[in-house]
Amino acid sequence: MGLDIRVFKNLKVVENPQLDEDGAVENCETEWTPGESMKWSEEHFPGRGEGVDPDKVYTWEDSFSFRAGSYSGYGWWRRKLEEFKGDNAFQELINFADNEGTIGPVVSKKLAKDFNEHADAAREYARTLGDAGEVWLYLYDDWKKAFEMASENGAVDFY
């Protein structure tokens, strides 16, 4: 078990989505709905999903996925992110769910800016982590790409 991430760019609402008898999207390869996961994250972390409607079904222009790590591995990575620059950046990710939820394009744009502004310093910081620094930096780059992509009318889906 762990945290997986799916990123979407240029979401477009599907007007007449094909749903199964339980109301789930039939073709998850081409359609996505934030649903209950986003409703939960918005209840606990209000505003993170701004720009996305949890009750809509979307298609997208581009997407990619990555594994953020086991739950404990992601927790370690996030603690290191907080040690790195958490006093003045990345708060919307540091203080977010580690299991499910959605971050929309508005917050993604802010986080993309944080990841870009601190990219050079992140490489320096990774060197202080010894052998683990390579893994930390690899994930930093995945998150950077995720928020850059989602900032273009997209979303970052935690599942």
Image (cartoon, rainbow, N blue to C red):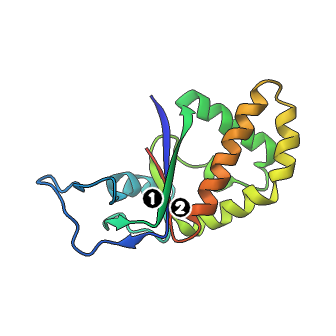
Tell which of 2 and 148 is nearer to you: 148
Quarter of the picture holding the C terminus = top left
SS at badge 1: helix
Q: Give 151 or 104, whichever is nearer the viewer.
A: 151
Give the tally of numbered discs: 2
Q: Is residue 133 above or below residue 30?
A: above
Read off the residue under disc 1: 42
Apparent side of residue 83 relative to residue 29 in the rendered image (left or right): right
Q: Position of residue 45 (x, y in %)?
A: 51, 56
Is 9 left, or right, of 32 in this rendering? right
Give the residue number, with chain letter if any, for mark 2: 48
- Which residue is located at x 38 percent, y 51 percent? 37
Give the x, y percent position of residue 25: 24, 56
Up the image or down, 44 lies above or below 136; here it is below
Assess whether mark 1 and mark 2 are in contact (beta carbons under 8 angstroms): yes
Q: Is residue 84 visible?
A: yes
View extreme (bottom): residue? 15
Question: Can you see residue 103?
Answer: no
Cα separation between marks 2 and 1: 7 Å
SS for dot 2: loop
Looking at the picture, does residue 54 appear above or below residue 146? below
Q: Quadrant of residue 125?
A: top right
| Circle on res. 102 | none
Crowding at mark 2 (Cα within 10 Å: few <14, some 14-19, many 20+): many
Furthest residue toward left: 21
Q: Where's residue 41, x and y in %? A: 45, 53
Which amino acid, mark 2?
Answer: Arg
Q: Position of residue 97 (x, y in %)?
A: 52, 45
The disc labelled 1 sits on which kind of residue? Answer: Glu
